[in-house]
């Protein structure tokens, strides 16, 4: 894991002091709310439905056990005993007091964490593959590149007042577990024919009101030019992205309106110029960072066997665990989606338990996934049964990774001031209704957003649900056929919307159509792609 | 027109206010120009020799195009005064300074103590910009 | 009726204009009538409230009820965590919200 040196620590400490001063000036009336709002947002502090909400950055989703424990302690000390893990691999607290926010940032800084640029029209927290460093299929661990981007983007003087927010993701395997092509910039670290590593740049993807899949604008940027290339992409966007309409201000609209070729031409011209300006960190800096992501000291010659005699454990093993590149180890996903629970929420005690389990069983590391779960990336198979028992006793042992109960849901109108409809109750009802058929239904990614901003990734759900406001009443649209992986696709709306109970029935009917039509080992998505929308529509509205 | 409240240069300030980019093209003797957010800073590059003052206007602080304009001029070797005017607030000063601005004429004068703290708070930065500060990666690797 | 709501600047708590100051309880809200803009401007300028605005509401036998679901949820708390609402001990308290 990346460890701060004195430079990193000093910047974060200075930020705490700066924010403390900004809060003081707001409370004393030296600045207005309009002036303060962008300042608090750039420290992740929103004003939501019930209170201030603080979004803490978890860079590329990686946490140490000490950091995780601090997240639990903050939930107890400053909030109401829980936190909410988000689709940006971050954590949010829902009941924060403005006057205490600087103290929270100081507590975070004591474990090398912050809330810098978790909101605002700037470069946000960079996300990555939750199995980085463990996945058998990765070309290389993508996190050092994400860390290089974190540093470059932190307090970037030119790109802190962009037309709109800017999200980046870095992956390093063909299996995309980070929805890379649905980001403003998605980077895939690739190896070319001569064995050299480089960065493929995908620019102009995103969800929101106009979902778009990012086109590849450069399939191979050498690693000693990656930051310069990103700087060129951002400069073209900062200068020419639309500022007349916030709904058309994301880079996807610029790339779409200019066309991929013209946007790429402008980036290449800016890139050629910036190469003369010395903005690229030396490769020695990348090597310094890489050294901190060195593989943990895996034991060799240990057993690769797991005792499957407990059927509940065997189901969890088959559902929630991923093969590891090191023999005798496995990557574990802890589901934060108990049947009928609130997706992504964890109590302070659960957070601290996961911290302890990571310390004892996963080389001190945890990951937050964009699907709002937690990963212990490096668990010894010999420890697995004991680990599962500890999780299960704490309500963290649900076996439903990528199943119908593993629903992504934004906070919705229960918490969010932007929302038009509640998301969580819909997730709870679907989970309760369909979890009993979880194994029969198999892989099915269901994603719910409570408004068009699509924080719940509804466009990318095999089944997506979008909450809208119809004359003051919550209404839910159903989408089918979205997917966020290497075969990214956007869902299609089935037709007229439903009320809360109606949407649950509609999802139930859609899964029945799948089960009636499925051939062989087809997943829901495969069947949908083969038979198309018509049979689903007929069952849902017929 | 707002007064220059902070200036980090020792040369004599240009007395004339900046003319628009269009007027600047037509007046071959003008030494001061004022850029609006939609103007292309690169249009000025052929004329850097005669330019002594570029005012970059921020009609609203959230429109960040002026930061790119400033860096483009600095990167091209412009060494005259680069003045931020308009909705210039305390918490933008450090970013502006890093992008090459060396004079500030905020529409509403700023608290001098707050401004001084903003200019000096961060002594280091992760990325090089137009202020000559050596980035942290350069400090790390000598 | 027109009632005024906002958040406490320091704590972020949801508050309602009761004619004299800002209450945590929507039942205390009064009809601000044509004074709405004046009160909002004055109270925000003195930082006694933050991000305040006027909404439509009605008074029935049980109390003051905001017209829109968003403010009804703000008035009580999240519908999915009864334990965190203003009336955690009363299971019927949220019946009017949705």
Image: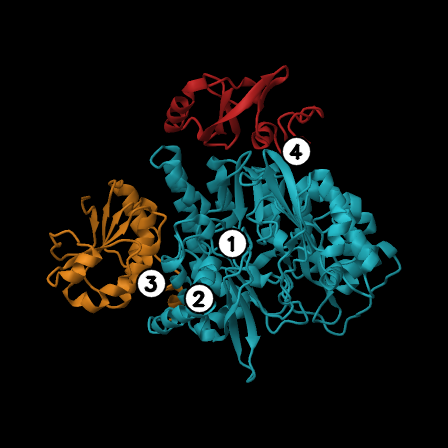
Q: Which residue is mark 2?
A: A230
- How crowded is the residue under tag 4: few (<14 C-alpha within 10 Å), some, or many (20+)? many
What residue sits 27% from the left and 65% below the top? B42
Q: Is residue A69 visible?
A: yes
What residue sits 41% from the left and 53% below the top? A163
Secondary structure beneath label 1: loop
How many labels were placed on the picture? 4
Chain letter for the part of the structure drawn in red: C
Q: Tell me where residue C70 appears, x and y as whole percent.
A: 57, 33
Secondary structure beneath label 2: helix
**The N terminus of chain A is located in which quarter?**
bottom right
Chain A display color:
cyan
- How crowded is the residue under tag 3: few (<14 C-alpha within 10 Å), some, or many (20+)? many
Q: Which residue is mark 4?
A: C79
What residue sits 60% from the left and 52% below the top? A87
For residue A263, which numbered disc appears in the image?
A: none
What residue sits 53% from the left and 77% below the top? A197
Q: Tell me where residue C11 appears, x and y as whole percent.
A: 50, 32
Q: Which residue is mark 3?
A: B129
């Amino acid at each position: 894991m990346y460890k701060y040196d004195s430079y990193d620590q000093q910047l974060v400490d200075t930020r705490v002091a700066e924010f403390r001063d900004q809060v003081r000036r707001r409370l004393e009336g030296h600045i207005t709310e309009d002036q303060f709002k962008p300042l608090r947002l750039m420290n992740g502090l929103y004003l939501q439905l019930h209170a201030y909400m603080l979004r803490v950055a978890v860079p590329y989703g990686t946490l140490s056990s000490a950091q995780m424990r601090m997240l639990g302690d903050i939930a107890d000390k400053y909030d109401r005993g829980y936190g909410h893990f988000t689709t940006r691999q971050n954590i949010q607290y829902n009941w924060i007091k403005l006057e205490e926010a600087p103290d929270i940032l100081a507590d975070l800084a004591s474990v090398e964490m912050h809330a810098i640029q978790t909101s605002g029209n700037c470069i946000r927290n960079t996300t990555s593959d939750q199995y980085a460093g463990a996945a058998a299929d990765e070309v290389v661990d993508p996190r050092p590149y994400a860390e290089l981007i974190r540093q470059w983007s932190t307090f970037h003087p030119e790109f802190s007042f962009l037309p709109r927010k800017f999200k980046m993701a870095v992956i390093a395997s063909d299996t995309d577990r980070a929805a890379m092509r649905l980001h403003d910039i998605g980077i895939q670290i690739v190896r070319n024919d001569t064995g050299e590593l480089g960065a493929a740049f995908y620019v102009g993807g995103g969800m929101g009101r106009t979902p778009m899949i990012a086109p590849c604008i450069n399939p191979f940027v050498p690693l000693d030019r990656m930051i310069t290339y990103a700087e060129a992409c951002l400069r073209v966007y900062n200068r020419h992205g639309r500022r007349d309409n916030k709904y058309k201000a994301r880079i996807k609209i610029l790339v779409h309106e200019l066309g991929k070729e013209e946007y790429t031409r402008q980036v290449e011209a800016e890139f050629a110029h910036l190469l003369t300006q010395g903005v690229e960190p030396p490769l020695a800096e990348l090597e310094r960072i890489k050294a901190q992501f060195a593989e943990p000291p895996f034991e060799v010659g240990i057993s690769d066997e797991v005792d499957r005699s407990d059927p509940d454990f065997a189901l969890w093993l088959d559902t929630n665990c991923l093969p590891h590149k090191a023999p005798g180890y496995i990557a574990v996903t802890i589901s934060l989606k108990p049947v009928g629970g609130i997706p992504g929420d964890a109590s302070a005690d659960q957070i601290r338990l996961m911290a302890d389990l990571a310390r004892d069983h996963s080389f001190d590391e945890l990951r937050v996934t964009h699907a709002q779960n937690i990963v212990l990336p490096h668990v010894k198979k010999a420890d697995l049964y004991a680990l599962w028992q500890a999780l299960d006793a704490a309500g963290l042992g649900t076996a439903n990774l990528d199943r119908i109960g593993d629903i992504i849901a934004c906070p919705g109108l229960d918490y969010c001031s932007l929302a038009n409809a509640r998301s969580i109750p819909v997730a709870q009802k679907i989970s309760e209704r369909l979890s009993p058929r979880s194994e029969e239904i198999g892989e099915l990614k269901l994603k719910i957003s409570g408004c068009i901003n699509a924080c719940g990734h509804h466009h990318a759900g095999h089944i997506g649900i979008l909450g809208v406001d119809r004359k003051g009443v919550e209404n839910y649209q159903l989408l089918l056929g979205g997917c966020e992986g290497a075969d990214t696709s956007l869902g299609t709306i089935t037709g007229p919307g439903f009320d809360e109970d109606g949407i649950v029935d509609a999802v139930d009917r859609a899964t029945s159509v799948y089960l009636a039509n499925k051939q062989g080992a087809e997943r829901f998505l495969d069947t949908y792609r083969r038979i198309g929308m018509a049979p689903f529509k007929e069952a849902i509205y017929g | 027109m707002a007064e220059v409240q902070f200036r980090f240069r020792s040369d004599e300030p240009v007395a004339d206010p900046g003319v628009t980019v269009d007027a600047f093209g037509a007046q071959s003797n003008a030494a001061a120009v004022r850029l609006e957010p939609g103007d292309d800073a690169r249009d000025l590059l052929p004329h850097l020799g005669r330019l002594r003052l570029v005012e970059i206007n921020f009609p609203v602080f959230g429109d960040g195009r002026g930061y790119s304009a400033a860096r483009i001029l600095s990167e091209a070797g412009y060494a005259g005064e680069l003045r931020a005017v308009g909705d210039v607030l305390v918490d933008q000063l450090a970013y502006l300074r890093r992008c090459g601005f060396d004079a500030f004429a905020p529409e509403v004068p700023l608290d001098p103590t707050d401004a001084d703290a903003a200019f000096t708070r961060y002594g280091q930065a992760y990325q090089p910009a137009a202020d000559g500060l050596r980035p942290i990666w350069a400090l790390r690797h000598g | 009726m027109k009632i005024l709501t906002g958040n406490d600047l320091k704590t972020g708590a949801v508050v309602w204009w009761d004619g004299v100051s800002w209450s945590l309880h929507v039942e205390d809200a009064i009809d601000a009538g044509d004074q709405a803009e004046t009160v909002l401007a004055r109270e925000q300028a003195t930082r006694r409230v933050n991000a305040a605005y006027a909404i439509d509401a009605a008074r029935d036998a049980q109390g003051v009820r905001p017209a829109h679901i968003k403010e009804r949820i703000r008035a009580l708390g999240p519908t999915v965590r009864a334990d965190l609402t203003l009336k955690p001990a009363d299971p019927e308290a949220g019946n009017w919200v949705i």
